[in-house]
Amino acid sequence: MQPALIIIIVAIVVAYFIITYKPKQEDDLKDLYSEGLDLMVDGYKQGAYENFKKIIAQDTTNVKAYIKLGQVIREGGNPENALKIHNQLNYRKNLSFYERKELYKNIALDYCSLDKIDEAIVYCKKILEIDKQNNWSLSKLIELYQSKKDWRNSKKYLELKLQYSGKKDSHLLALYKIQEGRNFLNEENFEDARRCFQESLDICDTVAIAYYFIGNSFSQESDSVYKYAESIKITATCALALP
């Protein structure tokens, strides 16, 4: 057989191998990924972890597998390592729109698991920067600000969520305003507390409990003034009793 013919045959075989092998490898990775997702849903975290590790070993550019690997690790009780994996992905420049949103979501959840609420809020807001109507992020911000007893910001994101969904719930918004007023009441900031209670009635005039808190604020303010006056009286009496 002539050398030229041998070279041609070898080239054909190599070309055939390249053409047929790559799709097979891609199919295998897709199957591993789908299986990993199914294992997560069924609660088999170790199996899912092994699948995503295999994918990454064969394809270090597979961002989705990295994200899911971190998620499995977080849900397995190790949010610190999950955050390390997710933060490494944060440096990549070529992430798709979907990958970037999923990454920010998982970083936010990592911080939640670490009880770092402020950091979680930052990443929820990053999602809104690229997808302002993202329902998950809006809902999570409402929840996170509630946990901080920051009812003003919680109400802000509730308003946005209702706006984007086309729904109206003035009663719920009024209740959030009352909670903001109660915070002021606990701080003995009676003027701002009553302002919030009045604004809640402006939002929804059927929230009758606002009237209770308005009356309660006057009662607490009166008690506070009385206690202050008594403390001054006691101090003055003690001073007079000194030689």
Image: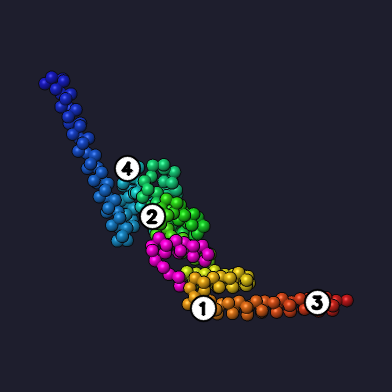
Q: Which mark is first along the chain, 1 or 4?
A: 4
Q: Which residues are magenta?
A: 151-171
Quarter placement of the C terminus: bottom right
Q: Nearer the viewer, mark 2 or mark 1?
A: 1
Residue on which disc 2 sits: 71
Q: How packed is label 4: few (under 14 Cα within 10 Å), some, or many (20 or more)?
A: some
Residue type, label 3: Ala
Residue on which disc 3 sits: 236
Residue on which disc 1 sits: 209
What element does badge 3 sit on?
helix
Find the distance from the CA under tag 4 to the CA under tag 1: 59 Å
Q: Is residue 43 visible?
A: yes
Residue type, label 4: Asp
- The residue at 31%/47% (across/down) is 54
Tell whether 59 sits left or right of 232. Answer: left
Q: Which mark is first along the chain, 3 or 4?
A: 4
Residue on which disc 4 sits: 59
